[in-house]
Image: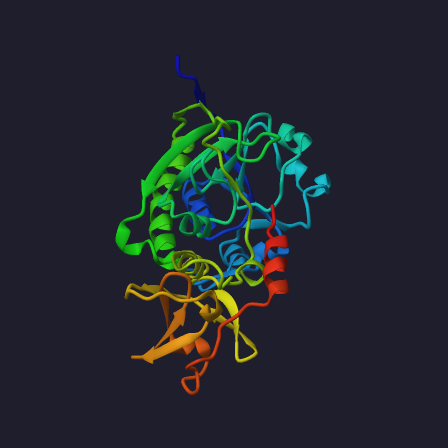
Amino acid sequence: MKKKFRLSNVDNFIIFGGGELLIDICNILINNKKKVVVISSNKQINKKFFSLKSSLKEFFIKNKIKFIVLKNLKNYSKWKYLINSRSVGISHSSKWIFTEREINFFENRLFNIHYSNLPSSRGGGGLTWNILTQNFYSGTTIHFIDKKIDSGFSIVNKTFSFPPNIRNSLFEMQKLSIKFQKKIINNFFQRIIDKKSFEIKKIENNFKSFYWPRLNTKKNAWINWSWNTPEIVNFINAFSHPYEGAATYFNGKVIRIHKARINNEKTTFHPFQYGLIYRVFNNKAYVASKNKGIEIDLKYLNTKKGVLGKRLSTPKNRLEKSLENIRS
């Protein structure tokens, strides 16, 4: 027999975290005359989004939405008083891990919105990991928060796939993902408001479970020119817009590359040639790599003159630090 769960008599939503879709969540709840309080970090609340053209803080002030900025959740006097029998807690792109005590405050009414599939894509890092692993399935999972990360029981499970024509573009993948997620989020909150039930499913942390940590483009996105051609191209595309781009050195300076493609001509290069620019044509630089060449726009090199025969390279210490700084 399938287990069902219903939230009744809810009029107070406490949302932890940030992110672009938090704006949609607030709009849904306000339009339905629900109370909303956002608890966020200084960094998240001041982050600006292209679609909003302002920060979350500016949006909250403009729309008279109450918000609290905290370094961590330990100062309970600043937020525990918000919780009552008609409250629901939502973790949305929150950087905080909830302790058992904090979970118990909500008495089985604290949920996490995870913008991917569970248990196959636990952790953070978003669609960058999808491009790196060439996994083009994603989705939305909403689950009860427990002591373990992205585990427990879910009440929403939706999956979609990215069409082949956008799988090399992080920006286009994110656009499609946000469009999909907005529908799921709207449906989720509307079901709560309408007092409809949800089906509870166990999130099995079995052999199909993967955990990927959060990433920082400035620290982690350094190109290793000893990788094979598809690995380098996927890596560059995985850190493309809206992020800062994959990094390497050229002419003694750090450059950021946002887009690359494989040149499929039949060519073999020796490892000593990896990273060398062997051709410049139609505003493209052709870089030698394992198996094939890589095409990148000349604009990423910040010069059009004297690039032939020059090498793109990343110092060993940069590569080592980029692995050390991956955050869980």
Up-down relation of residue 18 to residue 186 (above or below) = below
Percent across and percent down for residue 73 are: 68, 42
The answer to which of 84 and 201 lies nearer the viewer is: 201
For the rendered model, the colour scheme is rainbow
The answer to which of 79 and 135 lies nearer the viewer is: 135
The answer to whether residue 283 shows anywhere in this view is: no
| Left or right: 21, with 214 as reference point | left
Up-down relation of residue 139 to residue 107 (above or below) = below
Percent across and percent down for residue 279 are: 35, 78
Up-down relation of residue 289 to residue 165 (above or below) = below
Percent across and percent down for residue 206 are: 49, 27
Q: Residue at x 57, y 78 (%)?
A: 252
Percent across and percent down for residue 185 are: 40, 41
| Left or right: 105, with 260 as reference point | right
Q: Residue at x 63, y 53 (%)?
A: 324
Q: Residue at x 31, y 43 (%)?
A: 161
